[in-house]
Image (spheres, grey):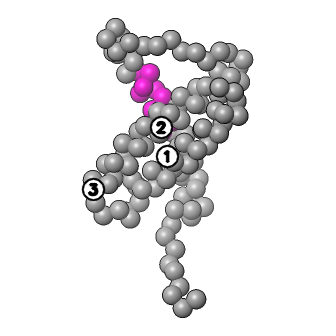
Amino acid sequence: MDVFGAFACLLVLTMFASTCWALVLVDGLNMKSSKIVFMGFLIIGCMLIGHYLGLLIALSNGLSFKPHPILWVDEPIRALSVMFSTLLAGGGFSFGIYSLLASMNVFTARAIDPTS
């Protein structure tokens, strides 16, 4: 994958994760089960964001980004640590973008004027 493809995937996934952050953190949803579903989407999105951040870092340093496959049976702790580290990197990045968008009032509900 080239830099532009990785950047495009990162942009789309970041917007998806920012929307999931808003749906999980804002009290607009009444049902707790829908927040659990969006938390699952958020976890998957953050892992993918961390993966593409690692890809962009490797590509910017001129390295080949072909990680060796990790078998769950052979190295479960290493596989969990890789997943957790990509989750943390993606979660921090996407929460930062969500915070930036929330400070610009992107995720606030606007009242619709019925007279216009």
| Residue where numbered disc 3 is placed | 32
Residue 96 visible within the image: no
Span of residues in magenta: 81-91
Tell me if 84 is positioned left or right of 18 in this view: left
Rendered residue at 58%/44% (across/down): 12
Total of numbered circles in the picture?
3
Looking at numbered disc 2 in the image, what kind of residue is underneath it? Cys
Image quarter in which the C terminus is found = bottom right
Q: Specify the amino acid type for callout 1.
A: Ala
Packing grade of label 3 (10 A; few <14, some 14-19, many >=20) is few
88 in magenta: yes
Q: Are marks 1 and 3 in contact (CB under 8 Å)?
A: no
- Relative to residue 32, is residue 13 depicted above or below? above
Q: Position of residue 102 (x, y in %)?
A: 54, 58
Gap between marks 2 and 1, in whole Å? Answer: 7 Å
Q: Which mark is residue 46?
A: 2
- Secondary structure at numbered mark 1: helix
Query: Which of pointers 2 and 3 lies earlier in the amino acid sequence?
Result: 3
Q: Main secondary structure of the magenta part?
A: helix
User: Disc 2 vs disc 3: Cβ atoms closer than 8 Å?
Assistant: no
Q: Residue at x 38, y 49 (%)?
A: 38
Residue type indicated by callout 3: Lys
CA distance for labels 1 and 3: 18 Å
Query: Which residue is identified by label 1?
Result: 17
Crowd band around label 2 with a 10 angstrom C-alpha radius: few (<14), some (14–19), many (20+): many
Q: Is 81 situated left or right of 108 in this image?
A: left
Q: Earlier in the sequence, mark 1 or mark 3?
A: 1
Element type where label 2 sits in the image? helix
Q: Are marks 2 and 1 in contact (CB under 8 Å)?
A: yes
